[in-house]
Amino acid sequence: MPKKDPKKDIVIYQSKSGAIELRGDFSAETIWATQAQITEIFSIDRTVVTKHIQNILKSKEVEEKSNVQKMHIANSDKPVAFYSLDIILAVGYRANSARAIDFRKWATKTLRAHITQGYTINRRRIAHNYDEFMKAVAISIQRV
């Protein structure tokens, strides 16, 4: 069995003021963040994140069962909740801060490019994973 590269399990959200690392779960095609990380991403108060998450789950915008995981963390008395990318995105679209606005602009630009062009390209990831990118291109060409 090939060794798992832990660096491939980290996703970086790059804001203008710095980077925040989030745990990737690529088998489930998502990333996970704690409330503290979501607070930092969007530069909002933790109570605001809590309120948004409660409303997102209450309205069933996102299903709780597959989008919230509780894990035990070292030196912690109780489990810590981790939230999926779906919840992170939903909070980002509800939050009212300069960073949340920057995030929405980036997300809208990325989604628009994907819809109009049929794909999106992350140039930095391709530069670091060029061989993997070329393999993916070859596979997608074979399927056509």
Image: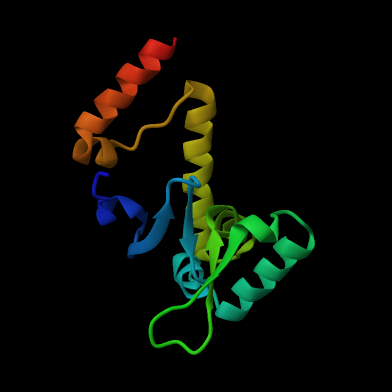
On the image, which quarter does residue 10 sit in? Answer: bottom left
Residue 59, x across and y down, in percent = 79, 59
Q: Quadrant of the C terminus?
A: top left
60, 76: nearer the viewer:
76
Say whether residue 86 is left or right of residue 136. right
Residue 115, x across and y down, in percent = 54, 27
**How many numbered marks have been drawn onto this rendered protein structure?**
0
17, 143: nearer the viewer:
143
As displayed, is residue 115 above or below residue 73? above
Residue 13, x across and y down, in percent = 38, 56
Q: Residue at x 53, y 33 (%)?
A: 112
Q: Residue at x 50, y 67 (%)?
A: 38
| Colouring chosen for the image of the structure | rainbow
Say whether residue 142 is left or right of residue 38. left
Residue 133, x across and y down, in percent = 28, 29
95, 28: nearer the viewer:
28
Q: Residue at x 26, y 41 (%)?
A: 124
Q: Residue at x 38, y 82 (%)?
A: 74
Q: Quadrant of the N terminus?
A: top left
Question: In the current view of this chain or complex, which residue is farthest to the front?
Answer: 1
